[in-house]
Amino acid sequence: MPRHVAIIMDGNGRWASRRGLPRRVGHWRGAEAARSIVRAAVDLEIPCLTLFAFSSENWKRPVAEVVDLMGLLRRYLGNDYAAEMARLDVRVRMIGDRSRLPQDLMRIVQRLEEASADHKGLQLTVALSYGGRQEIAASARRLAEQAAAGRLDPTLIDEDLLAKGLELADLPDPDLLIRTGGEMRISNFLLWQVAYAELIFSDRLWPDFSREDLEAALIEFRRRDRRFGALSSTG
């Protein structure tokens, strides 16, 4: 079983368009799929799950769609979700640029993080307004500031030190990255952390992605020979 599964939840809009429905309906169905996958991850005893919900590039979408997505997040992350996460003993946190999110949504996120901070089960991370390049740049900037202030010898800066400044520094790197929707790219998601992750691309649009699809991805993961740059264990 992978210690950490990361998922790019892609295909909500196309799911709706193929059915002649507004894109917001696809996003709503996608939110329900995410909820189902969280429950499945708990049942399957996956330690860590990170879901890519809204990227830093998604702010470029039409204003009306962004407003719909923010409204969806308010409802999705509200009181009933907090109650369910408590029942499942799931710890929830958010990564990404919080400064761009509406204040009321940030208060909802903060309440959810605080309420679940002591939960010991699944470690659920939701990436909102997140970009991998931005995250790496922010960590490098903090190290540069420390070096400029004389608090850090720049010759001591290495991969481990930079990694400690990333938002998921306390979690293992993802062992498995799943992307739905038929696209085969990483899209600026956890660029540093997925350096040695196994990648699985599914043609299934996210609203149709089910527990069975997750289990199939885990079976495929177990078939992989993870070498991390070394020779195969089978020779």
Image: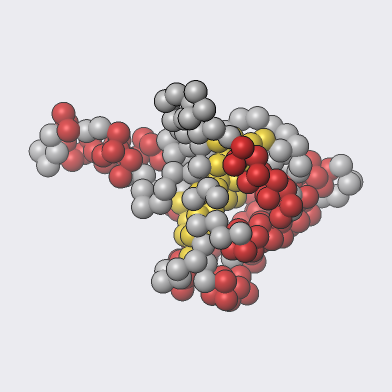
Question: In the displayed structure, would residue 72 be above or below residue 193?
Answer: below
Q: Is residue 162 above or below residue 93?
A: above
Residue 201: image location, x then y, percent: 67, 35
Taking the spot 59% from the left edge, 42% from the top edge, the residue there is 222
Left or right? Give the position of 86 relative to 98.
Answer: right
Relative to 200, is 104 on the left or the right?
A: left
Number of numbered discs on residues:
0
Residue 169 visible: yes
Residue 60 in view here: no
Q: Residue furthest right?
A: 20
Residue at the image point whose x is 49% and y is 44% from the top: 174
**Which residue is located at x 30 percent, y 45 percent?**
164
Quick one: which residue is furthest to the front in this view? 234
Q: Position of residue 227 (x, y in %)?
A: 47, 30
The quarter of the picture where residue 80 lies is bottom right
Image-quadrant location for residue 179: top right
Residue ID at (59%, 63%): 42
Along the viewing direction, whichever of 108 and 43 lies nearer the viewer? 43
Q: Is residue 14 left or right of residue 5?
A: right
Foreground residue, 205 or 47? Answer: 47
Q: Position of residue 159 (x, y in %)?
A: 30, 34
Tell me: residue 154, above or below residue 69: above
Question: Residue 186's spot in the image, x, y percent?
Answer: 57, 33
